[in-house]
Image (spheres, grey):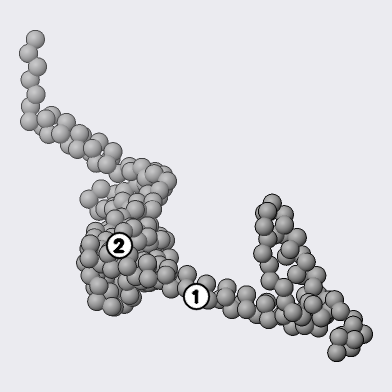
Amino acid sequence: MEVVFNIPQIFTVVVIILLIALLLSAFRILREYERGVVFFLGRFDKVKGPGLVIIIPLIQQMVRVDLRTVVMDVPSQDVISRDNVSVRVNAVIYFRVIDAQKAIINVENYLQATSQLAQTTLRSVLGQHELDEMLASREMLNIDIQEILDARTDGWGIKVSNVEIKHVDLNETMIRAIAKQAEAERTRRAKVIHAMGEMEAAEKLSEAANKLSTEPNAIMLRYLQTLTEIAGEKNSTILFPLPMELLKGLFSPKDHDNKQ
């Protein structure tokens, strides 16, 4: 049995298939973290999603936008600090789209634009600080870079939530210079602490001397206590000085007069 299709029948089948394809293309499903920016004949219409979205084929177009947080590495940048030290610095930024309309309409590629802006901002901000600040005040620098990026990307519908400087790479010469500086700083601190200890000890000894001078018998008690401590070390021979002031207390004034 031979089946023969004429041209009108084939055309009808093709049209039906195209209509079914267009009907199926009108249905779009957006996930919870996605939004669809809809254009009607090239003009912005609305932002739809999540869930089932119906788009009129050939008249409306939709661009998907991911609202999840993006983690982007900032490539290593050559930075010259304010004290003329050359370093290489890299970082990582965390941002997300909060306005899908601005992210699609106001900038051609918000991912690339944010990456380039992060690189230039990193060089600009770090170039205003000295090397010691880069190494010791990273938290402050992270906040400064984050605030600048957040302000400049606000018109793109992007929220920069965090910026972290990962590495500050130095050459070998600068590393040795920093090590010498740290060693000298520790030596200085040791000398200062030793001098402060000597000063405090001198103050306490002066107070003790003033206290002993007001009590004549106090020096005798302190002297006997010292002898007791020496004798406790099981020494067979003990040599100790005998101040002449102590001998005055052994003789009464009468004995002194008789000798005269």
Task: For the N terminus, give its image quadrant.
Answer: top left
Q: Residue 230 location in percent, x, y?
A: 70, 59
SS assignment at label 1: helix
Three-letter amino acid code of the residue under disc 1 = Val
Q: Which residue is mark 2?
A: 168
Task: Determine the residue positioned at 23% across, 37% down.
Answer: 21
Q: Which residue is mark 1?
A: 192
Q: Quadrant of residue 145?
A: bottom left
Nearest to the eye among marks 1 and 2: give it: 1
Task: Determine the residue positioned at 52% across, 72% down.
Answer: 194
Residue closest to the eye, 149 or 58: 149
Q: State the CA–CA distance, disc 1 to disc 2.
A: 31 Å
Residue 77 appearing in the image: no
Q: Quadrant of residue 106?
A: bottom left
Categorize mark 1 by other alpha carbons within 10 Å: few (<14), some (14-19), many (20+): few
The mark total stands at 2
Q: Residue 110 location in percent, x, y?
A: 28, 61
Lower sequence index among marks 1 and 2: 2
SS assignment at label 2: strand
User: 106 above or below 62?
Assistant: below
Residue 221 appearing in the image: yes
Task: Determine the residue positioned at 36% across, 42% down.
Answer: 29
User: 17 above or below 72?
Assistant: above
Q: Residue 161 location in percent, x, y?
A: 42, 61
Task: Determine the residue positioned at 85% across, 89% down.
Answer: 260
Q: Quadrant of residue 255?
A: bottom right
Q: Which mark is residue 225?
A: none
Three-letter amino acid code of the residue under disc 2 = Val
Residue closest to the eye, 112 or 18: 112
